[in-house]
Amino acid sequence: MAATLTSSDALPSPPLSARLTPPQVWGIVLLAPYLLVFLAFVVYPVCYGLWLARQPASYVALYHDPIFARAAVNTLIFLVIGINIKMLIALFLSGFFAQQRPWIRWLSVIFILPWAVPSIPTILSVRFMLNPEWGVVNQLIFKFTGDDGPNWLNDPAVALAMAIGVHIWKSLPFWTLILLTGRLAISHDLYEASDVDGANWWQKFRYITWPSMQTLYITCTLLSMIWTLGDFNSVYLLTGGGPADLTHVLSTLGIRYLRLDQLSLAMASIVCAMPFVLPLVYFMMKRLSR
Amino acid sequence: MKLPTLREVGTEAKLLLIGIPVFIWTMIPIYHMFLFAISPKEDAFSGKLWPEHPTLHNFSIVFHQQHYFLRDFWIQFWNSTVIALAAGALTLFVATAAAFSISRLRVPGGRAVMNLALFTYFIPAAFLAVPMYRTMGNYGLLNNHWSLILAMVTIASPYAIWVLKQASDKLPVELDEAATMDGATTLQLFRLVYVPLMMPSLVAVGTYAILLAWNEYLYAFLLLSKDTDITLPVALGNFLAADDSPWELLMTTGFIYALPPAAVYYAFKRYMVGGLTAGAVKS
């Protein structure tokens, strides 16, 4: 009886004494599997990776590698232009999907498909569409104009734009859905009141929608930026980093160095991204761990 | 019946003007894939909206492994299935135990562990892949399914723990107190009170981990290499390396590979949408 009493006392509030009660022993036992996974597959790899990236020579080599500079610029374009376009479209479409119509509800079910299916087959499908000889895009161009279409993926700027397009295609539904929940949480009364006052759609957006959604929108944008840094598939499967290694982003570049057995360069290139990543991660953790 | 006013027609037209491009944009890559899958080889490149002679022949070739690239199709399908289910089950076990410990038992240091997990959630997966590859090599797990399963558990559990912790924080403390009063041990509390109450969140988290593992390409392609060990996405990627790869078969295989996760997603949408939207971003 005494044991059960102490354990029920310990439950609601964090314990002050160092003596462990049975539930606390269980707590440690139950937390152990995750701690083991974390130590073996996060802490050890990260420390090992940092150790591999310790030599200044790696950074000098990176600095002199034009592919690295190009990949850094590409990554910035991907994040700054790609993500902002995506989030603006998502913000716009969340307003569209907030309309109450049966056909729009059906469309939203279809709209989520890119998010629900794995990315590999659909990226390969896009890649085939853009094939200069056999792809359906150039076939159609030939049919209607009689000219040969461009070699889409052979121009680095176009190829990178296409990779950004694939990324947007894949992740737009997710962010639209998130922003839609934010939008639906806004009280309907506010819009009705503004109708009475004769506000137009821009004023409604400017004074009702945006103020209640801006925090969510900015959080989503930052989160999407962090995750997009790890988007390996969109670039790798569409362009393979080519032509001439001009469309690499940091995530594919790291893997490229790894494949070339230049592990210290791979880790160094990742370490170079950290000054950008860590503040974002810190900010997100502050927001989510409240 | 009231006739729609001009204004209503105008609104509807504007909505359609957005809706139709959205539909086309969404469907093009998927429809293109589907078109290839049901077209005979000669028809596949014609650029028509519907093949003249739609056929299921490509599916039969894939299912009977009648092509050089497809000779290990079933074993790769099996690999994908086993790895996804194992990663799902392990993630569920690790994350549920951790969330229970942090949220209900208030284990000392639980909050710190939660923050570490969140930190992992925000490391871009492709960045962790490089050191993870070497680590798996050091552990002697390369080309072993366990390497991919454990990597997926590592990536899936932070989010899983976080979602489960959010959900279990909402359960009233009185439940635990009442159960303990009645003489329940901690394990009984976990098994008989906690797990049944958390079922919807557990379904969401399990589905999330299974889909994550089934869809994973990068880690699978780094950690596994033998033709009979690899998962379906890696096999699809390997198709691409060859110049003479049969597109219609690649698209058919891709279509078959994409069906299970899409079906799972729609079947569990109810759980997924709640979990994901509440979980991914808290405003």
Image (cartoon, coloured by chain):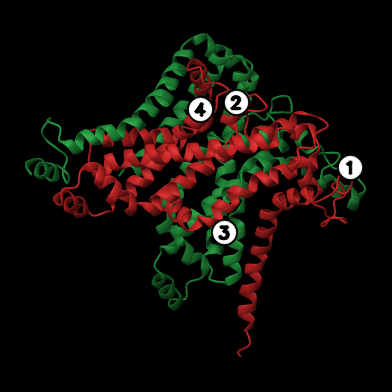
Q: Please tell me if label 2 and label 3 are on a single chain.
A: no
Query: Disc 4 or disc 1, which is closer to the eye?
Result: 4
Residue A112 image position (x, y, % from top left): 58, 55
Return the disc, 1 or 3, that comes first in the chain's sequence.
Answer: 3
Chain letter for the residue marked with disc 1 in the picture: A
Chain letter for the residue marked with disc 3 in the picture: A
Of helix, strand and loop, which one carries label 1?
loop
In the orientation shown, which residue stands out farthest toward the left? A2
User: Is B182 left, or right, of A125 in this rendering?
Assistant: left
Kindly identify the amino acid type of the residue bearing the numbered disc 2.
Leu
Kindly identify the amino acid type of the residue bearing the numbered disc 1.
Asp
Residue B17 image position (x, y, % from top left): 67, 65
Residue A69 image position (x, y, % from top left): 61, 23
| Mark 1 Cα-neighbour bin, 10 Å: few <14, some 14–19, many ≥20 | some
Question: Which hue is chain A drawn in?
Answer: green
Query: Disc 2 or disc 1, which is closer to the eye?
Result: 2
**Displayed quadrant of residue B178:** bottom left
The residue indicated by pointer 2 is B224
Of helix, strand and loop, which one carries label 2?
loop
Question: From what the image shows, is residue A150 above or below residue B260?
Answer: above
Q: Distance between the residues labelled 1 and 3?
A: 35 Å
| Mark 3 Cα-neighbour bin, 10 Å: few <14, some 14–19, many ≥20 | many
Question: Which residue is depicted at the point 49% across and 34% down?
Answer: B152
The residue indicated by pointer 1 is A148
Q: How far apart are marks 4 and 3 (CA)?
A: 41 Å
Question: From what the image shows, is residue B212 above or below residue B138?
Answer: below
Pointers 1 and 3 in contact (CB under 8 A)? no
User: Of the numbered discs in the image, which one, if any, rests on residue B146?
Assistant: 4
Return the disc, 4 or 2, that comes first in the chain's sequence.
Answer: 4
Query: Disc 4 or disc 2, which is closer to the eye?
Result: 4
**Displayed quadrant of residue A102:** bottom right
User: Is B108 left, or right, of B138 in this rendering?
Assistant: left
